[in-house]
Image: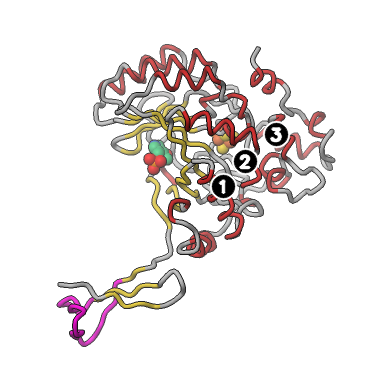
Amino acid sequence: MELWQEELQQCVRTLDQLERFVAIENRDEMKRVLANMRLSITPHTLKLIDFANMADPLLLMAVPQAKELSITPEEMADPIGDDAKSPVPFLTHRYPDRVLVYATFSCSHYCRFCFRREKTGAASPGPSTYDMDIIEAYLVAHPEVDEVILTGGDPLTLLDAQIEDWLVRLRRVPTVARIRFHTRVPVNLPSRITDNLVEILRRYQDATHPIFIVTHFNHAREIATENVEAIAKLVDAGIVVRNQSVLLRGINDDAATLTQLFKTLTNIRVVPYYLHQLDLARGTNHFRVPIAEGIDLMRQLQGTVTGIAIPRYMLDLPGGKGKVPLSHPFVRQTQVSPPHREEGSGVVDANGLDWTADSPFGETVQYVEPT
Ligand SMILES: *Cc1c(COP(=O)(O)O)cnc(C)c1O
Ligand code: SF4
């Protein structure tokens, strides 16, 4: 058995095991919490959690709380409409050029804020060989799909042979150029990034058929030596690694913490891709940061943090309506009346429209476009 498989067996999965690290006040309540979403904390993450501090960001992300039993009326079982756009089992086709494929519903470690918490860790087995045939046929019938995102659950918890099976099948479809893995393994189970796995990934990419790994760090303290080494192996093999974070109350909801996270990622050659507004999954309201606050946090980073470290802040609309970026409206079209000509700087639009901008340093700037 490989080290990562041994580590999977050593995860904290029961209340009795958890009690060795934290006091459990109300066992009945906690049992109900775990009935909604199971518990697993990997040995790697256990090592990084500061159990002396009940407000430790890494603890809050991993240790279940009774607050998960409070569900607001706005929260939903399927918050981003994965099921609404599923033409065949284990596949969501929402955008014309790319599909999500759920390779498994298991994860090595369960995040208490998981947006897919109603499915992850459920007893449901992943796709069978028969389901994989149907997915392959769907891709052949839909040549407009040039990207497949293997997600879950966590696809990198599958065995090497299963991962290779997916890669063989996807590379058999000539119209699929890009393969993406969405995984939290580099965060919670870095030992999974074995030389053999990296070699498999390398074998199924070439100069025009890349493999992307999109991982999920939410706090700079999740980036320990083992994580840095796992990322380095992937990047050195020519795999592009990007990161999606989720904006979480008490974990990364201040400009200094976000700055440190995004810069540390950039320094280990991970591209900060998205910062997600937390989806309206049931029992996650204690983690939710208001959108207005998130927009203001990202405004604070503009100009003060190197551009290569700034992700886009995204809102996934309910009902499968799609993702849209959230941003402070730095530049606004404004009415100037009466229309006037400025010496040497062009004219305002014939309708008297002009642009007004907020500079990154808090100044208000007029921008006159040449006509
Ligand atoms: C989020 C998502 C994607 C990926 O979107 P990107 O903006 O390309 O990262 C693809 N399909 C579905 C259904 C999604 O929810
Ligand atoms: S790794 Fe992803 S799918 Fe798994 S529990 Fe965490 S957020 Fe959910």
Badge 3 marks a residue whose secondary structure is: helix
Residue where numbered disc 3 is placed:
34
Is 122 in front, or is 355? 355
Identify the magenta region.
333-353
- Residue 210 visible, this orientation: yes
* Real-space CA distance between mark 1 and mark 3, rounded to the nearest whole angstrom: 33 Å
State the CA–CA distance, disc 3 to disc 2.
27 Å
Mark 3 CB in 8 Å range of ligand 2? no
Q: Is residue 21 left or right of residue 75?
A: right
Q: Position of residue 220 (x, y in %)?
A: 62, 47
Residue 282 versus residue 129: which sits nearer the camera? 129
Label annotation for residue 264: 1
Q: The disc labelled 1 sits on which kind of residue?
A: Thr
Q: Is residue 43 left or right of residue 202?
A: right
Quarter of the image for the N terminus: give it: top right
The first of marks 3 and 2 along the sequence is 3
- The amino acid at mark 2 is Ile
Q: Which residue is mark 2?
A: 223
Q: Residue 349's x, y, as percent?
A: 18, 75
- Most extreme residue toward the front is 236
Element under label 2? loop
